[in-house]
Image (cartoon, rainbow, N blue to C red):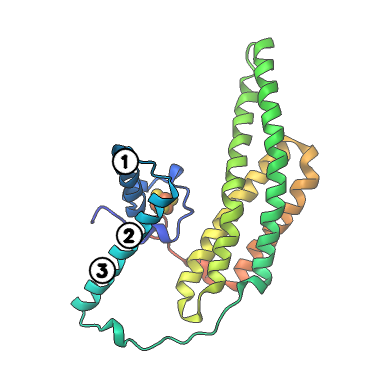
Amino acid sequence: MNEFIPGIYNYCDRWCERCSLSHQCLLAVREKKRLAEHRWKGEDPYDWKIIMQDVGDSLKEAMELIKKAAEDRGIDLETLPEIKSEPRDPDQHSLFRTAEKYRKLAHRFLRKLKDIIQEEGIDLTKRVEIMPSPEKEAENFQEIALCYQVILWYHTLIPAKIYRALSMPDTCDFDSDGSAKVAYLGLTESIKALQKIYHWDKNLEDNILPLLITAGQLRKGIDKKFPGHCHFKRPGFDK
Ligand code: SF4
């Protein structure tokens, strides 16, 4: 257990394929093991029934661990006082509504960008056949394809993390700040990617500017609502 960083997966962006700390993440290591075990048995690890069964097993295991930890500390889980907290409705919060606006704008933009990338990809292949070394072009193109991945990954994660941050009761400011930070970092990465695409193809200005404005509003909104996010230390990622 010592090799794992406790709670690292609670405040990450869940982009495991490019995570530099996946070897220290219990969740990632378990998932790898789960996939290998099912494949070894000739089962499809992405089959819905298999996933649900695994989720059930892991919940059971988590409950047993909680019970054991409570017993060790002499805590009776049955008699714990009820924690009363005001119900929250993040759907109505302007920050979440702006995050949803960003998601929808990004979704439309990504569809358009995907078509352009696919056309350019074919074009570039043709140009490689005609001209000997359009290396720079290929590099730029790869960079744009990567920017596409970045915007794609974060455009759904951002509203999800903002929703979580807004859902937490006042007693969980720490967790709200952590979720808000993940959304903020995702926005920062997305803004950089959008700026690169803007310089790559100025014809996309009309699509990119509203996205940049909305992303900027979101970052300001997070700063205002969750000022603690900038001091939050994500386990494993922040010193
Ligand atoms: S910490 Fe890294 S490996 Fe673990 S869930 Fe998050 S992104 Fe994936």
**Residue placed at 52% from the left, 67% from the top?**
229
Residue position marked by numbered label 2 in the rendering: 58
User: Which badge, 1 or 2, is on the more N-terminal residue?
Assistant: 1
Label ID, residue 36: 1
In depth, the one of 23 and 234 nearer the eye is 23
Residue tagged 3: 64
Query: Which residue is at 67% across, 37% downward?
Result: 114
Between 52 and 184, the residue placed more toward the observer is 52
Q: Amino acid at mark 1?
A: Ala
Residue type highlighted by circle 3: Glu
Of label 3 and label 2, which has the lower sequence position?
2
* Residue depicted at x 63% and y 35%: 144
Secondary element at tag 1 = helix
Q: Spatial distance from mark 3 to mark 2, Cα to Cα?
A: 10 Å
Quick check: 179 left or right of 197?
left
Residues at marks 1 and 3 touching, judged by CB atoms closer than 8 Å = no
Looking at the picture, tell me which residue is in the foreground, 160 or 77. Answer: 77
Residue 86 versus residue 193 in the image, above or below: below
In which quadrant is the C terminus drawn?
bottom left
In which image quadrant can residue 124 be found?
Answer: top right
Within 10 Å of disc 1 (Cα), the crowding (few <14, some 14-19, many 20+) is some
- Which x, y percent locates residue 173? 48, 75
Q: Which of the two discs, 1 and 3, labels the residue nearer the N terminus?
A: 1
Quadrant for the N terminus in the image: bottom left
Residue 205 coordinates in the image, percent (x, y): 78, 44
Helix or strand or loop: what does disc 3 sit on? Answer: helix
